[in-house]
Amino acid sequence: MPASTSKIVMCGDYGVGKTTFVKLFLGGEIGGGYKPTIGVDIGRKIFDIDRNRITFQIWDLSGQESFHSIRKQFYSRTDGAILIFDVSRRTTYQNITRWTEELLEETGKIPIVLVGNKIDLRDELTEFVTTEEGELLSKVISSQTGIKTPFVEASAIKQQKNLEPFTMLGKTILEQKES
Ligand SMILES: Nc1nc2c(ncn2[C@@H]2O[C@H](COP(=O)(O)OP(=O)(O)O)[C@@H](O)[C@H]2O)c(=O)[nH]1
Ligand SMILES: [Mg+2]
């Protein structure tokens, strides 16, 4: 991997929308990653943030989210992570802590962004994870890990805030390279 390439991992339970975010960001299909046997799709995109060029190599678990054996390789040499939960399924929110711990154990301190996805479903539901709860979780992660963890609410399907997690992560990674 060239030094200028940043490996980004998509974390969160099955069905939260990880692949939807990646496909929208890459502007096409992903798949055919070079390690299909470990259940990971890998996509690549070069983009510009504030006149700086950055290359993301994005790793997305392909339906193997529950297999612990896969995830060690998955996290290896990661530069940044997008942690996603589904506001319509509280268990996916509760499991973020576990995803975070597992990730950071392998990577050490790296930039992360927390995403509450599927906010379009709130209209139809009486029980959902609220904005305040999402913000609280990001504060807890920040204070426990020492990593400033921005929180974004999104609806990938409606293409609301679906690119923000990537650009926020890119900015943080660029800032760290400069300092
Ligand atoms: N209502 C709604 N559905 C979504 C949203 N984002 C993704 N989905 C749907 O949720 C399902 C799981 O998405 P997917 O990206 O495969 O999740 P993954 O398992 O985390 O990769 C699919 O049917 C998506 O179309 C969203 O913002 N709102
Ligand atoms: Mg997926």
Image (spheres, grey):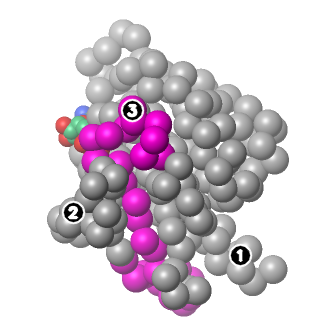
Determine the residue positioned at 45% across, 41% down: 69
Residue beneath label 3, please? 66
In whole angstroms, how far apart are the C-alphas of marks 2 and 1?
30 Å
Specify whether residue 160 is in view. Answer: no
Compared with 120, 125 (above or below) is: above
User: Which image quarter has ligand 1?
Assistant: top left
Q: Residues within 10 Å of mark 2 (few under 14, many from 20)?
A: some
What is the span of residues highlighted in magenta in the rendered image?
45-71
Corner quadrant of residue 85: top left
Assess whether residue 54 is covered by the magenta stretch.
yes
Q: Nearer the viewer, residue 80 or 36?
A: 36
Front in this rendered view, residue 115 or 146 = 146
Q: What residue sits 43% from the left and 71% below the top?
A: 57
Residue type indicated by callout 2: Gly
Instruction: Identify the residue at the far top of this view.
Output: 126
Q: Secondary structure at mark 1?
A: helix
Residue at mark 2? 31
Front: mark 3 or 1: 3
Which numbered marker is on residue 7? none
Q: Is residue 94 on the magenta stretch? A: no
- Comparing 61 with 29, the one in front is 61
**Location of residue 15 in the rendering, given as x and y in whole percent from the top left corner:** 29, 34
Q: Earlier in the sequence, mark 3 or mark 1?
A: 3
Image position, residue 142 (x, y; %): 75, 42
Question: Distance from label 3 to label 1 (Cα)?
Answer: 33 Å
What mark, if any, has residue 175 been given in the picture? Answer: 1
Q: Tell me the kind of residue under disc 1.
A: Glu
